Structure formats: C-alpha cells, structure tokens
Amino acid sequence: MKPKISVLFTALLVAFLISPLFAGNLEPLARAPIIATAIGDGAASDVLALVCEMHGIDYENILQLKPEDFTERLDSKNAPGTLFIAPGAMVEGDLYTVCGVEEIDVGQEISRIEELVSIAKARGVPVVAIHIEGGFTSPDNDPRQSFDLLMPKADYIILVSPEGPSEYFSALSEETDVQLIVVDKAERIIYALDLLFSMGGS
C-alpha cells in the first residue's frame, strides 16, 4: 500500500519544487542521521551539509568515506540512517580542490563507492544521490560516469536544477526506475529532505 500524500507534498507539487515524474510513487525511505560522501569532484554533499546545519539535521559529511569507516559508524550507537552520495566528474590524476582529493585514482574511487553502496544495501540503509545540475560542457565536469556507477543502485536522486530536469536526468530516472526529486534552488533541498523523512516516518 502506497503512503498517503502529505499536505507538504501537495504544496511542493503546486509550487513546482518537486518534479511530478515519479512523485506519486514515493515510498518510506530516509531517516536521520545522514552520512554523506562524494564521487570525484562532486560538490553537492558540501551544500547538503550547509542545509542540514541550518535546519538542525544530524549530519556527517566525509568526502572520502572509506568502507571500513562506514561499517564502524553503522555499528555505533548513533548509526547513520541514510547514505547520501554526491556524483561528480572523475578525471585521472586531477586535483579537486572542492573535495580535497589529489591525484585521484578512478579505479579506486569506483571500488570505494561500490563497496559503500554494497554495505548500505546489506544493512538496510537507503542510498540517495544528490546533484546540483550545471550542464555538461567538458569531460572535466561531466558527472555521467558517476551516475552510471550509482544507477540503478540508488533509491532516489535529489536534483537541484532551476530549469527542471534535463533530458538526460529524465531519461535516466525512467530507464533505471530510480525516482527523481527536483528542487529549483539549493536552499530548497530542505523540502526534499522533509518529504523523504516524512514518508520514511522520521
């Protein structure tokens, strides 16, 4: 049985803050605390950290979260309830000042993310991708390799896009059956979190 649509959810739809693509199919999902990491130069986890800090949401942002550290946290008293991953471009040997990663090894980065997702799935922790869309102008800022890695393993995609989802993200959501939640401004990520948490019973 699908959960009832909340008043908040209806308001968001009316305001066009949430994409209607799969909105009616939302099921219970996210819960705090949140733990987040990034792929390559993905910057959205830093933005998410600011949003969570502003709204008092229990959150930890570890840009190079290691699988063994994730497992240790899951075994702790205040275990993470949701894993957020911010996809970004992965360019061999590049310097990512946003994420503080030097001389990135793409193979190791892929392995790290795959292990994190595998651990999350095994422990019943939902996985949410979060991305701030800025268009893909060159291989150096194209996150599609990261999305190919995450899909269809993620449970949801939160996309920040003033113009709404691009053809790429709309097609990705439909092809992988991963539900897409779209907000038009970074500060409105909180609406997506409120929605996921309320549907998840937190």
Image: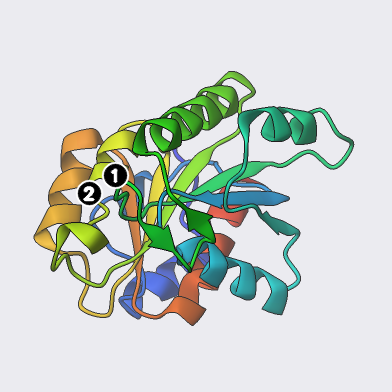
Q: Looking at the image, which residue is at 58% across and 29% down?
A: 120
The residue pinned by badge 1 equals 147
Can residue 44 be seen here?
yes
Q: Looking at the image, which residue is at 48% across and 54% down?
A: 102
Q: Nearer the viewer, residue 36 or 30?
A: 36
Q: Nearer the viewer, residue 73 or 156?
A: 73
The residue pinned by badge 2 equals 144
| Circles 1 and 2: CB atoms closer than 8 Å | yes
Percent x, y of residue 180: 32, 53
Q: Is residue 9 left or right of residue 49?
A: left
Q: CA distance from mark 1 to mark 2?
A: 5 Å
- The kind of residue tagged 1 is Phe
Mark 2 is surrounded, within 10 Å at the Cα level, by few (under 14), some (14 to 19) or many (20 or more) other residues, namely some
Can residue 1 be seen here?
no
- The kind of residue tagged 2 is Arg
What secondary structure is found at the residue carrying circle 1? helix
